[in-house]
Image (cartoon, rainbow, N blue to C red):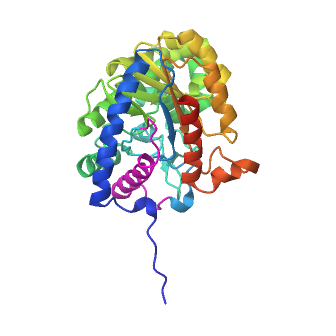
């Protein structure tokens, strides 16, 4: 007798009753978080900053393979997966997470349109082939052309997914993952060749950054046109609500590797150009880029930094001291094993003004085996609720 396949709970479409409940929960949550976010961007005094304990991730990295669908990159499956996991989150956790749909095709969409070869491996994030780079020499930079969002690379696939999401869900839709000018240039060349280009052919480096920047601005505008989002607003920055306070966000993870001088010459003008095209916005990076505090202050249109600090709270405090009341900080991380000590240090160290706390709870990343913490690892919901309850008690005693 043949076994009957069981549908993953993460891909079961919402019933009409569930969808109705979700809409009501979403509306109440959005109103609450809008008010809190306005306080954050105004740097108003507060005893308890907004906080997020989120396990409903749109990316693949860190998710449990047993609950992740093989055909996730089908817009119908992606939409059902995100709606189902967001609904599961908001009906049990009353944090400050505002769900929105994200057409996720890895961090390589713009790079794919500029010539990178993209690989789709089972239950992994799409990634660029590390053995092939479309830009190697200054001559390649000169030949590089601005791509057409309707024709090149993964861009048409993302636009089709945006159209599906917009037509089939009540949730807001955000544009796809956005790697900034520096990260995209690195994807096209690789670190070694890019560094040599900066030092040996600075004019070609500026030409590369100029072409990449123009590509990125056109790409975001094309997506906003599909979803009907104003140029100077975006629903969120890596699942942190921004709304009218930011028109764009992008990732700049390679900032942590750059010297102050090199970053100021080759990156700050292009980051500024992207941010100003959308009325200002947010930059994300993982790690410690505190040495760029002055560069951040010189970046036109920078309103917030989304920092996955990798458990380095002192670096965030030093950055806050330099940027106080000028740049909002989204202090984010993957939930560590000893989360009580981590959050205690964070709350004792940082000024709560202009801060949002975001803990990405994953069953695979961050929470490793260990003694008393095994209880929070039994399943996704148990762990998520334990971290949420601890933060709630600390912030609202």
Q: Nearer the viewer, residue 188 or 87?
A: 87
Give the camera-side residue of 77 and 171: 171
Q: Judge whether residue 319 is colored magenta.
A: no
One can see residue 130 in this view? yes
Residue 112, how many percent across, how many down? 43, 42
Q: Residue at x 57, y 15 (%)?
A: 320
Q: Which quarter of the figure has residue 190?
A: top right
What x and y, as percent, mark residue 98? 39, 38
- Residue 285 drawn above or below residue 53: above
* Residue shown at the point (48%, 46%) measured from the top left: 57
> Magenta part of the protein: which range?
68-97
Q: Can you say whether 133 is above or below 142 in the image? A: below
Q: Residue at x 34, y 48 (%)?
A: 157
In the image, 123: left or right of 20?
A: right
Residue 372 position within the rendered picture, expressed as x and y whole percent measured from the top left: 73, 48
* Residue 77 among those drawn in magenta: yes
Q: Position of residue 71 (x, y in %)?
A: 43, 61
Q: Nearer the viewer, residue 343 or 214?
A: 343
- Is residue 257 something one can see in this rendering? no
Q: Is residue 206 left or right of residue 23?
A: right
Quadrant assignment, res 159: top left
For the residue pair 42 and 105, the one nearer the viewer reads as: 42
């Amino acid at each position: 007798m043949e076994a009957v396949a069981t549908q993953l709970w993460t891909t079961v479409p919402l019933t009409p009753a569930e969808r109705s409940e979700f809409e009501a929960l979403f509306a109440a949550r959005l109103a609450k978080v809008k008010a809190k976010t306005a306080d954050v961007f105004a740097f108003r005094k507060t005893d308890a900053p907004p906080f997020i304990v989120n396990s409903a991730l749109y990316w693949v990295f860190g998710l449990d393979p047993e609950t992740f669908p093989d055909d996730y990159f089908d817009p119908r499956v992606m939409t059902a997966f995100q709606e189902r996991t967001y609904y599961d989150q908001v009906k049990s956790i009353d944090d400050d997470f505002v769900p929105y749909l994200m057409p996720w095709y890895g961090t390589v969409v713009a790079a794919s349109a500029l010539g990178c070869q993209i690989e789709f491996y089972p239950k992994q994030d799409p990634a660029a082939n590390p053995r092939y780079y479309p830009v190697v020499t200054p001559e390649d930079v000169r030949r590089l052309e601005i791509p057409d969002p309707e024709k090149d690379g993964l861009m048409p696939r993302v636009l089709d997914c945006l159209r599906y999401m917009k037509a089939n869900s009540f949730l807001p839709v955000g544009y796809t993952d956005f790697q900034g000018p520096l990260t995209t240039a690195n994807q096209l060349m690789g670190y070694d060749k890019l560094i040599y280009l900066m030092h040996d052919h600075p004019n070609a480096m500026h030409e590369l950054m100029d072409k990449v920047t123009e590509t990125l601005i056109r790409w975001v505008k094309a997506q906003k046109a599909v979803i009907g989002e104003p140029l100077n607003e975006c629903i969120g920055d890596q699942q942190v609500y921004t709304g009218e306070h930011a028109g764009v966000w992008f990732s700049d993870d390679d900032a942590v590797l750059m010297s102050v001088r090199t970053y100021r010459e080759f990156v700050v003008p292009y980051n500024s150009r992207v941010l100003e095209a959308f009325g200002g916005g947010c930059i994300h990076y993982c790690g410690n880029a505190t040495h760029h505090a002055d560069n951040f202050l010189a970046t036109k249109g920078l309103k917030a930094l989304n920092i996955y600090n990798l458990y380095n709270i002192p670096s965030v405090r030093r950055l806050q001291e330099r940027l106080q009341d000028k740049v909002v900080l989204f202090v984010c991380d993957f939930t560590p094993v000893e989360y009580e000590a981590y959050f205690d240090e964070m709350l004792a160290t940082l000024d709560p003004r202009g801060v949002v706390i975001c803990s990405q709870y994953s069953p695979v990343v961050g929470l490793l085996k260990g003694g008393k913490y095994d209880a929070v690892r039994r399943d996704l919901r148990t762990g998520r609720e334990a971290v949420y309850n601890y933060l709630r008690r600390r912030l609202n005693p």
